[in-house]
Amino acid sequence: MNPATLKGRSLVTFKNWTPEEIQYLLELSHEVKKASRTGDIHQRFQGKTIALIFEKRSTRTRCAFETAFGEEGGHPVFLSTQDIQLGAKESVEDTARVLGRMFSAIEFRGYKQETVEILAREAGVPVYNGLTDQFHPTQALADIMTLQEIFGKLSGLKLCFVGDGRNNVARSLLIVCAKLGIHFTVVSPKELQMDAQILAEAAPWAASSGASIQVTESLEAVAGAHAVYTDVWVSMGEEASRDEKIAMLRPYQVNAGLMKKTANDSCVFLHCLPAVKGEEVTFDVIEGQASRVWDQAENRKHTIKAIMLATL
């Protein structure tokens, strides 16, 4: 592929990205990480600015965008909902038009997927989805990069997501796995299984890449997994249903017993963080030898820098 075709592109989900384009981002991410180890300093964003819009709190996403952009000589500007009129006195469309004339790029982390899609449509500059209730594409790219580092390949790996199958990370992983030939299994209670619409969207991508997609209630489905992934049981905005969700998901805790069901000594544990140790994952698993969660966290920065380099 011609990398120049990515200039000016937004990333709201990976639905409209080809497997070749995703692979290019991964290759660039590995180069960026290698450069960070050798101390190479570049100023590729000198003279550029990025607006970082946050409706939801963040550790990894905010720090990754700010440090990645700043290290390249650019100027990141953090904007919370207390700082701007987004969706309050000013429509999302108007906010997008104003920011697009002042900034080189925009990042949005918040609730509605519709918001980031409007920003991308109206801003005239690249817009990056730092998380919405529906999708978390920058997280998924870091996760896949981590798998590639560990196993040296992607096609043919089996990744199992255990927990809330409607989760924004699970939905983003489904898209990337289907496009890159990674077998993807979602293990969750029937009430929390992934919606039929996105499974139908992913089916032709999986058929093309050779990936298999499975959605099940059975914990036995983790057999043969190369990686077991989970996320917090109660996401931001779901606090009112906390007790109900915890009761529903308790059997789906990732613990030593579940990891043993993989029957794979080299199986790794993944989590997008923050984690509630003792709920969705036990302390011994997340702090154990199989855990690669800190590599994932670091790779958020390298993949986000790669996305911005490719599109700016």
Image (tube, grey):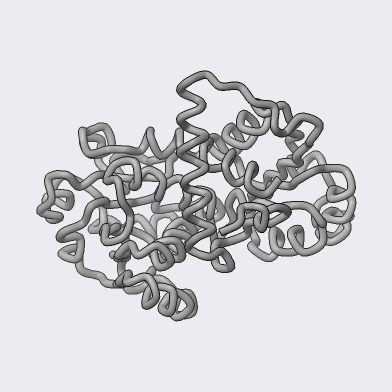
Up the image or down, 222 lies above or below 303; here it is: below
Q: Where is residue 229 in the image (x, y as percent from the top left)?
A: 32, 51
Q: Tell me what residue is drawn at x 30 percent, y 72 percent.
A: 212
Q: Position of residue 284 (x, y in %)?
A: 21, 35
Up the image or down, 303 lies above or below 240; here it is: above
Q: Where is residue 59 in the image (x, y as percent from the top left)?
A: 55, 35
Number of callouts: 0
208 sits left or right of 216 in the view = right
Q: Position of residue 138 (x, y in %)?
A: 53, 49
11 sits left or right of 225 in the view = right
State which quarter of the image contains the N terminus: bottom right
Q: Tell me what residue is drawn at x 32 percent, y 72 percent.
A: 210
Front position in the image: 174 or 252: 174
Q: Tell me what residue is drawn at x 25 percent, y 41 percent.
A: 282
Name the outermost residue toward the front: 2
192 sits left or right of 40 in the view = left
Front position in the image: 199 or 57: 199
129 sits left or right of 286 in the view = right
State which quarter of the image contains the C terminus: top right
Residue 281: quadrant of the picture: top left
Up the image or down, 147 lies above or below 209; here it is: above
Q: Tell me what residue is drawn at x 63 percent, y 56 percent.
A: 11
Front position in the image: 276 or 29: 29
